[in-house]
Amino acid sequence: QVQLVESGGGLVQPGGSLRLSCAASGSIFSIYAMGWYRQAPGKQRELVAGITVGGSTNYADSVKGRFTISRDNAKNTVYLQMNSLKPEDTAIYYCNADIRNSGLLKNAYWGQGTQVTVSS
């Protein structure tokens, strides 16, 4: 069994910051790309940021310069530092990772989601 567990969401005022964490655990052989997605009410889920094993990153245009994705391979954890938050960043944020389990099967796994609300 492989699990992704997110933490760090909450309520923040516009202009504020939050840091999301997502830890992978279970029968893991190796982890490949990791990323963060978000889904706002009435909208489709969209990619926010992604990071490869080697540390290459990509971002949605809407968050470039404000959000930073990083990972700690020793801890099987990916982070999303969110600065200068705007009300339009309000959404449920989901962690995603491509993981090869101990049985050498590779799948995409999702976390349960964490709510981020930006409001005064």
Image: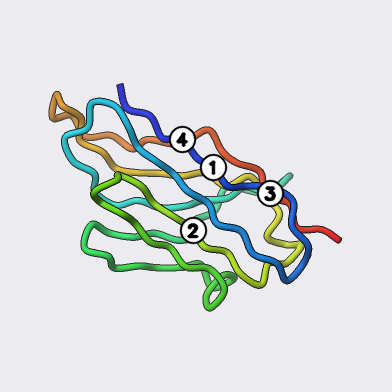
The residue singled out by tag 2 in the image is 80
Query: Relative to 90, is 75 above or below?
Result: above
Q: Amino acid at mark 4?
A: Val
Residue occupying image coordinates x 24% and y 44%:
31
* Secondary structure beneath label 4: strand
**Quarter of the figure with residue 75:** top left
Whole-Å distance between the Cαs marked 4 and 2?
14 Å
From the top left corner, tell me how far across and down residue 68 is, in percent.
47, 68
Q: Nearer the viewer, mark 4 or mark 3?
A: 4
Whole-Å distance between the Cαs marked 2 and 1?
10 Å
Check the image and name the residue furthest to the right.
120
The residue singled out by tag 3 in the image is 40
Pointer 3 local density, CA inside 10 Å: few below 14, some 14–19, many at least 20: some
From the top left corner, tell me how far across and down residue 30 is, in percent.
18, 41
Upstream in sequence: badge 4 or badge 3:
4
Left or right: where 86 falls relative to 109? right
Q: Amino acid at mark 3?
A: Ala
From the top left corner, tell me how far across and down residue 4 is, in percent.
41, 35
Upstream in sequence: badge 3 or badge 1:
1
Q: Nearer the viewer, residue 43 or 96?
A: 96
The residue singled out by tag 1 in the image is 7
Q: Nearer the viewer, residue 106 or 74?
A: 74
Residue occupying image coordinates x 57% and y 70%:
63
Q: Which mark is residue 73?
A: none
Q: Which mark is residue 5?
A: 4
The quadrant of the rendering that contains the C terminus is bottom right
* Secondary structure beneath label 1: strand
Pointer 2 local density, CA inside 10 Å: few below 14, some 14–19, many at least 20: many
Upstream in sequence: badge 4 or badge 2:
4
